Image: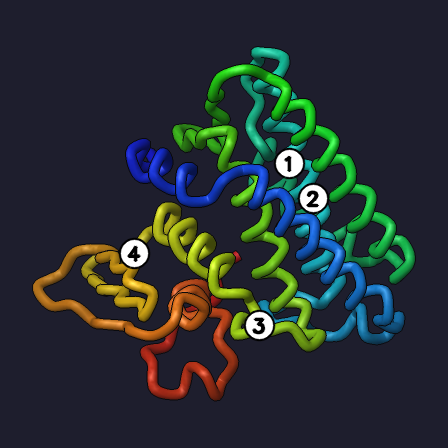
Amino acid sequence: MAWDLARQEALSTFAPVAEVRKIKLEATQRLLGDTISLSERAWQEPGRLPGWTRAHVATHLARNADAFVRAIDSVLTGRRGLMYDSDDDRELAIERGSERSGLELQIDLDTSAGNLSERLDLLDSVPGRLTVELSPGTFLRSDLLPLARLYEVIIHHVDLDCGFEVSQINPLTARWLLEWSVLSYQAPYGMAVRLVSTSGFTAVLGASNSETVISGPDAVLLGWLTGRLSAAEALHLPAQPPLI
């Protein structure tokens, strides 16, 4: 999948990397502040993603940070290296990691996030814009990596089901993440959706003879597009499965 380079450039201008990194740090600390109070039993209870406990979600988020570190290292060393060796390896790591204690999960979340921040510091010191291959054929501007990670932190904070909802995302961050989601979204075959935000942002996803119009604030559109709206928020909208 090739992501549109012109839209990447526009998004990079709209979401300055220094500001995104600041918001990412704040979002990470907020998530860690919520997870520190989870009991052993709560960690093994279901999160928002079908078939996953909170421990699965936390492990996925930690391994995602490691994967971004791996991608950055490949750029810094000039050697090709994808985020994950294979889907099977990724799923096995999440399954095994979900079996750990709450303390181990909390330390992993904190440590992996810190390691990624250090690598992003190194990346900031490299002159010029670099391109990262996230998966075979999927290339991303390196200055959008913090935004990609911010998306993971906020969306999976919702998935932990510990009190954080998409409606709590501040308006600017919601707009950034909505545009990021549109950039990376693959509409099902034969489906066309027009997103119309109260902020003025519009986008058409997919192709069909007829369009479904979804309108509302950026946070609501983000929640619908990613399948993260609460039952009450999604009441009058078409069903949308959650994206991992």
Q: CA distance from mark 3 to mark 4?
A: 26 Å
Q: Is residue 109 left or right of residue 194?
A: right
Query: Label 3: which residue?
Result: 168
Residue 173 spot, x, y in % from top left = 51, 57
Residue 66 spot, x, y in % from top left = 70, 37
Query: Label 4: which residue?
Result: 187
Query: Label 1: which residue?
Result: 67
| Mark 4 burial class by Cα count in 10 Å: few <14, some 14-19, many 20+ | some
- Amino acid carrying mark 4 in the image: Ala
Q: CA distance from mark 1 to mark 2?
A: 6 Å
* Mark sitting earlier along the chain (3/4): 3
Tell me which corner region of the image, top left, top right, bottom left or bottom right, holds residue 2.
top left
Q: Secondary structure at mark 2?
A: helix
**Residue located 58% across and 52% down the image:** 152
Q: CA distance from mark 4 to mark 1?
A: 25 Å
* Closer to viewer: mark 3 or mark 4: 3
| Mark 2 burial class by Cα count in 10 Å: few <14, some 14-19, many 20+ | many
Q: 122 or 172: which is nearer to us?
A: 172
Residue 1 in view (yes/no)? no
- Amino acid carrying mark 1 in the image: Ala
Residue 197 spot, x, y in % from top left = 31, 67
* Mark sitting earlier along the chain (2/4): 2
Q: Secondary structure at mark 3?
A: helix
* Mark sitting earlier along the chain (4/1): 1
Query: Label 2: which residue?
Result: 63
- Amino acid carrying mark 3 in the image: Gln
**Residue located 22% across and 57% down the image:** 204
Q: Secondary structure at mark 1?
A: helix
